[in-house]
Amino acid sequence: MLNKSNRINKDKDFDRAFKTGQSFYTKDFGLKAVDNGVDKIRLGILISTKVSKKAVVRNKLKRQIKEIVQTELPALKPGKDLVLIIFSQILDKNFGEIKSLIISALKKLKLYI
């Protein structure tokens, strides 16, 4: 589980990521990255009920994504806010495929040290 200091909770932080952040989109998810002025990586995940009506499915995806980001946290550049927007096509993927997709997106945005 991610520490509270590594989470985005405020709407203004999400809005700033959408307005000024770097973008990377696939058919499975979108990733926005923006400087946050803090010396930590912070993560926010957006999953609509359009992805799945079942909260169990949405929460499982959130847990999987948080685990992926937490394992990659030491290798990422500090001082960024990451917002992941999840689309319904990701339901067809297993954990390994989701992990490789997210890692490749982080590499494309040059977020590794």
Image (cartoon, rainbow, N blue to C red):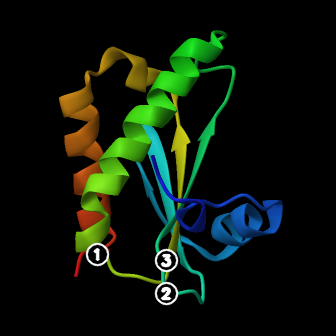
Q: Residue 45: horizontal and vertical position, in percent? A: 57, 46
Q: In which quarter of the image is residue 92?
A: top left
| Mark whose residue sits in front, 3 or 1 | 3
Residue 80 point in image, percent of width and height:
49, 77
**Mark-to-mark CA distance, 3 and 2:** 8 Å
Structural distance between the alpha carbons of marks 3 and 1: 11 Å
- Amino acid type assigned to the residue bearing label 3 in the image: Lys
Relative image position of residue 31 (x, y in whole percent): 47, 55
- Mark 2 lies on residue: 39
Q: Residue placed farthest to the top in the image? A: 54
Residue designated by label 3 = 80
Secondary structure state at the residue bearing disc 3: strand
Q: Quadrant of the C terminus?
A: bottom left
Task: Please say whether residue 84 is visible from this viewpoint.
Answer: yes
Q: Residue furthest right?
A: 11
Q: Do the residues labelled 1 and 2 touch (CB within 8 Å)?
A: no
Q: Earlier in the sequence, mark 3 or mark 1?
A: 3
Q: Say which element carries label 1.
A: loop
Q: Which residue is drawn at 66% across and 19% down?
A: 50
Q: Is residue 37 above or below residue 46?
A: below
Give the residue displayed 23% in from the left and 72% down from the top: 75
Residue shown at 26% from the left, 28% from the top: 95
Which of disc 2 and disc 3 is earlier in sequence?
Answer: 2
Residue 108 visible to an observer of this rendering? no
Q: In this view, does 50 lie to the left or right of 28?
A: right
Residue at the image position 26 percent from the left and 54 percent from the top: 71
Tell me the amino acid under the disc marked 1: Lys
Would you place residue 67 above or below residue 38 in this image?
above
Q: Give the residue type that dot 2 points to.
A: Asp
Number of numbered markers: 3
x, y (%) of residue 94? Answer: 25, 21
Label annotation for residue 110: 1
